[in-house]
Image: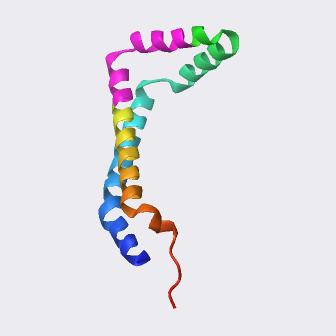
């Protein structure tokens, strides 16, 4: 039975998962060439350490409302592909069910 699930995974799940990971990687590298994540993280850490929590949420809202359109497209694409990866992973786990981890050796 383990071989059946392995073949099903390689033929049915792995190609879609690999394609989603490739698309997500392309989106992240595209965003990296356009967006300076180092400055974003430095600003976020500064806000978190020097201001109350309410100010941090204000910073996040300001960052999104003042972001350029291309940055928001990269973010939306990454979120959508990430959601698809989570959805497909949950579907695969549900399809296999709890039996995947309960294999016993039959002699």
Hey, which quadrant is residue 66 in on the image? top left
Query: Residue drawn at (34%, 35%), measured in percent from left and top?
Result: 80
Magenta stretch in the rendered image: 57-76
Is 67 colored magenta in this rendering?
yes
Query: Residue drawn at (53%, 83%), measured in percent from left and top?
Result: 105
Query: Residue drawn at (32%, 25%), measured in percent from left and top?
Result: 73
Residue at the right extreme, as displayed: 49
User: Going by the image, does 54 lie left or right of 15?
Assistant: right
User: Going by the image, does 73 lie left or right of 34?
Assistant: left
Prevailing SS of the magenta stretch: helix
Q: In the rendering, at what x and y percent does residue 38 appear?
A: 56, 25
Rendering colour mode:
rainbow
Q: Is residue 41 above or below residue 95?
A: above
Q: Nearer the viewer, residue 49 or 74?
A: 49
- Quarter holding the N terminus? bottom left
Query: Residue drawn at (41%, 42%), measured in percent from left and top?
Result: 25
Q: In the rendering, at what x and y percent does residue 63 appear?
A: 46, 13
User: Going by the image, does 49 lie left or right of 83?
Assistant: right
Hey, which quadrant is residue 95 in on the image? bottom left
Q: In the rendering, at what x and y percent does residue 106 appear?
A: 50, 87
Q: How many marks?
A: 0
User: Going by the image, does 42 lie left or right of 64?
Assistant: right
Q: In the rendering, at what x and y percent does residue 94 appear?
A: 39, 56
Is 74 colored magenta in this rendering?
yes
């Amino acid at each position: 039975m383990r071989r059946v699930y392995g073949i099903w995974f390689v033929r049915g799940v792995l190609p879609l998962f690999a394609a989603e990971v490739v698309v997500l990687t392309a989106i992240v590298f595209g965003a990296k060439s356009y967006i300076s994540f180092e400055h974003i993280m430095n600003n976020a850490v500064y806000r978190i350490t020097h201001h109350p929590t309410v100010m941090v949420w204000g910073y996040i809202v300001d960052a999104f409302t003042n972001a350029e359109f291309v940055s928001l497209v990269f973010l939306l694409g990454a979120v959508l592909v990430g959601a698809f990866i989570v959805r497909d992973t949950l579907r695969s786990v549900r399809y296999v069910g709890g039996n995947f981890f309960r294999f016993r050796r039959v002699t």
